[in-house]
Image (cartoon, grey):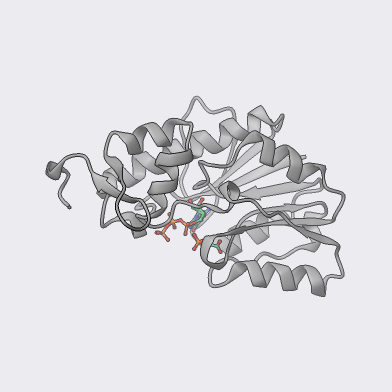
Amino acid sequence: MRAVIPYKKENAKSRLSPVLSQNEREEFVELMLRDVVSSLNSAGITEIDILTTSSEGVPEDLDVNLIVADPGLNTSINSYLQNVDEPTMIIMADLPLVRSSHIKKIVSYPEDIVIVPGKGGGTNILFIRQPKDFTVKYHGCSFISHYEITEDLGKSRRVFDSFLASIDIDEPHDIVELLLYGNGLSKEYAEKRFCAETGKGRVKISPLSKLSGFI
Ligand SMILES: Nc1nc2c(ncn2[C@@H]2O[C@H](COP(=O)(O)OP(=O)(O)OP(=O)(O)O)[C@@H](O)[C@H]2O)c(=O)[nH]1
Ligand SMILES: C[C@H](OP(=O)(O)O)C(=O)O
C-alpha cells in the first residue's frame, strides 16, 4: 500500500491571498504537507510519493519519494496511476485535520474505492485498490465525478463521512477550523497570525496584527 500527495508549492493556495502573502502561503502549504505526512506515518503508511511540480520546496528531511511532473493535477495523477500496482491513497496536501485514525479506517474498508468528500464538492482523499483501472477528475464538483467514475467502472465504493477529513484549507474561513481543531505545525503557524473571533454567528478569523496587511 502506498500514498501519493499531489503538491504544488509555487504560488500555492492562491485563494488564501486575501489573508496571506505569497511567501506565507508557500510556507504554510509546506507545513500542511508535513502534517499530512505525519498522519500517514502514524497510521503506518511509510511508502509516500510526493507528486510535485518541482523538486524544490519539498522539505529534504521528509522520508518520501519525489516524483516531479509538469503542472496539471489530473494529467499528472492519471499518468502516475498507470504505473502503480498496489492499493493507493491519493491524499491532498492541504488536509491538516486528517488524523491517523481516519487513515487507518479508510484503508480498512473492503470496498474497491473509498471517497472522502471535501467541502464544496471536492475530493480530499481517494483510496483505490486497483489504481490502473481508475481515472481521476479533480476540480469542479469532483466528488460527483469520482462517484460516477466508480459507478461506470462497476466498482464497489464507500463514501467516508467525516467532518475533520472533509476540511481542506482553501479559503480564509477554513482557517477557523484549523485554529479550533488542528494539532500540528500548520495550526501553530496559523495561531501566530490569526485568532478565532466569536460573535453572533459563526466564529471568524481575525488577524493578530494589523501590520500583516489586512483586517
Ligand atoms: N502535482 C501537482 N499538484 C497540484 C497541482 N495543482 C494543485 N496541486 C495540489 O493538489 C492539491 C489540491 O489543490 P488546491 O486545493 O487547488 O491547491 P492550490 O492549487 O494550491 O490552491 P489554489 O491556488 O487556491 O487553487 C494540493 O495538494 C496542491 O498542492 C499541480 O498542477 N500538480
Ligand atoms: C482539487 C480540488 O480541490 P478544491 O478545489 O476542492 O480545493 C478537488 O477536490 O477537486
Mark yes or no: residue 83 visible.
yes
Q: Residue at x 38, y 52 (%)?
A: 12
Of 64 and 209, the residue lying toward us: 209
Is residue 102 toward the left or the right of residue 203 in the image? right
Is residue 202 toward the left or the right of residue 48 in the image? left
- Return the residue found at the far left: 211
Q: With respect to residue 96, does 131 lie above or below? A: below
Quarter that holds the N terminus: top right
- Image x and y of residue 76, in percent: 59, 58
- Image x and y of residue 151, in percent: 80, 72
Q: Residue at x 26, y 52 (%)?
A: 19
Of 18 and 69, the residue lying toward us: 18
Total count of labels: 0
Q: Residue at x 72, y 29 (%)?
A: 44
Tell me which corner region of the image, top left, top right, bottom left or bottom right, holds residue 156.
bottom right
- Return the residue found at the far front: 200
Tell me which corner region of the image, top left, top right, bottom left or bottom right, holds residue 66.
top right
Of 207 and 144, the residue lying toward us: 207
- Image x and y of residue 160, in percent: 71, 54
Mark yes or no: residue 57 visible.
no
Is residue 14 toward the left or the right of residue 70 in the image? left
- Image x and y of residue 71, in percent: 48, 59
Q: With respect to residue 148, does 84 lie above or below? A: above
